[in-house]
Image (cartoon, rainbow, N blue to C red):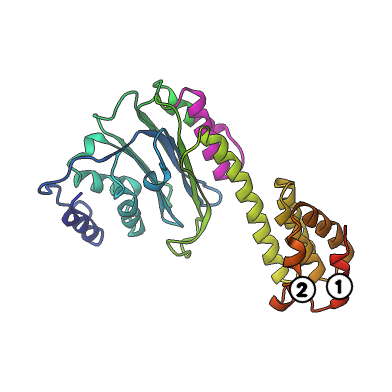
Amino acid sequence: MKRSVRLVILASIFTVYGAVDATPVGAPEPRRPAHTYSIAARDAETGQLGVAVQSHWFSVGTSVAWAEPGVGAVATQSFVEPDYGPLGLELMRAGKTAEQSLTALLAADPHAGVRQVGMVAADGSIANHSGANCIPEFCDARGEGYTVQANLMWRPTVCAAMRRAFEASEGDLAERLMAALEAAEAEGGDIRGKQSAALLVVSGDRSEPPWGGRLFDLRVDDHAEPLHELRRLLEVARAYRSMNEGDEFMADGDVDRASEAYGRASALLPESHETAFWHAVALASAGRTADAMPLFARAFERWPRWRDAVQRLPAAGLLPDDPALMERILAVE
């Protein structure tokens, strides 16, 4: 889209819906062929919003997946026009439904026939579009609070498989989005193969800033098995979320709940020396030295430089300035 059309769309969100100029002059030809499959969805219980995508195209997540806390989520693909992401969110932020937002953007796009877009708003409304000139096999489908779309697929049944998987899966929104992607790949996926994937999940809390509230923001830009890698990254991300929760409990003085959160992180990443180290630091700083020592030993064995790092923590206020405590920590084997 030309900048003049973008500005018309932005202006229209503050006027009566439908006042959109759809006749740009000299509009450029479609540019980036991110043929792919994706899902945009809202979790009715938590209000979380998210997009997940996989493609045989480098770094697909940078152009396809868009979401804003408490506002909506957008997947824009085929001959992708990234403007559908931020402009769709702008329209939904102004109170338009997903259908109204998508209709306005399509009206201003002279190349709507090669676009494929899915939108979901925080109010639960959904919309999708598959232009007649998308490359077969292409499909789309809607369900309560979600939309799936795919193009250049090996089989025409990918969308149906994604829909079944999303509706049947359990867990949080991130888990259900992953299940939809894995079902698409099991159905044959992209006729060209696989290369990149992304998962974006944001909070349902609109008080979060547009750049915040990101619960998961994961990208696999180039990988032989992008979904396997995305699944691995999701587990790592869950572990570090638990670490952050532990830090928050420690700040509140709740050592028991902090230790539980750190323990969940270690269970998710049993080989991580970092989760063990910071768990140990938290316990030692709270006076639970005996509980901390086995964790320090595990961290030092896996990464000896932690012995140097721990000596820097009293100056930062992360451990008591107690030479006897430091001597005891460094003596663990």
Residue at 28%, 30% in the rendered image: 134
Q: Position of residue 322 (x, y in %)?
A: 83, 78
Q: Is residue 203 above or below residue 141?
A: below
Residue flagged by tag 1: what amino acid is it?
Leu
Image spot of residue 159 (x, y percent): 43, 28
Residue 120 in view:
no
Residue, x 77% and y 73% (percent of image)? Answer: 319
Front residue of this view, candidates 92 and 224: 224
Name the dominant secondary structure of the magenta segment: helix
**Residue 166, disc:** none
Q: From the image, tell me which residue sits under label 1.
A: 325
Q: CA distance from mark 2 to mark 1?
A: 9 Å
* Magenta-span inclusion, residue 173: yes
Residue on which disc 2 sits: 319
Q: Residue at x 67, y 60 (%)?
A: 245
| Residue at the limit of the structure toward the left, as seen here | 25
* Residue 222 x/y as whole percent: 47, 39
> Which range is magenta?
163-189
Q: Are marks 2 and 1 in contact (CB under 8 Å)?
A: yes
Please tell me which of labels 2 and 1 falls first in the chain: 2
User: In the rendered image, is residue 330 in sight?
Assistant: yes
Quadrant of the rendering where the C terminus is positioned: bottom right
Callout 2: 10 Å neighbours few (<14), some, many (20+)? Answer: many
Q: Secondary structure at mark 1?
A: helix
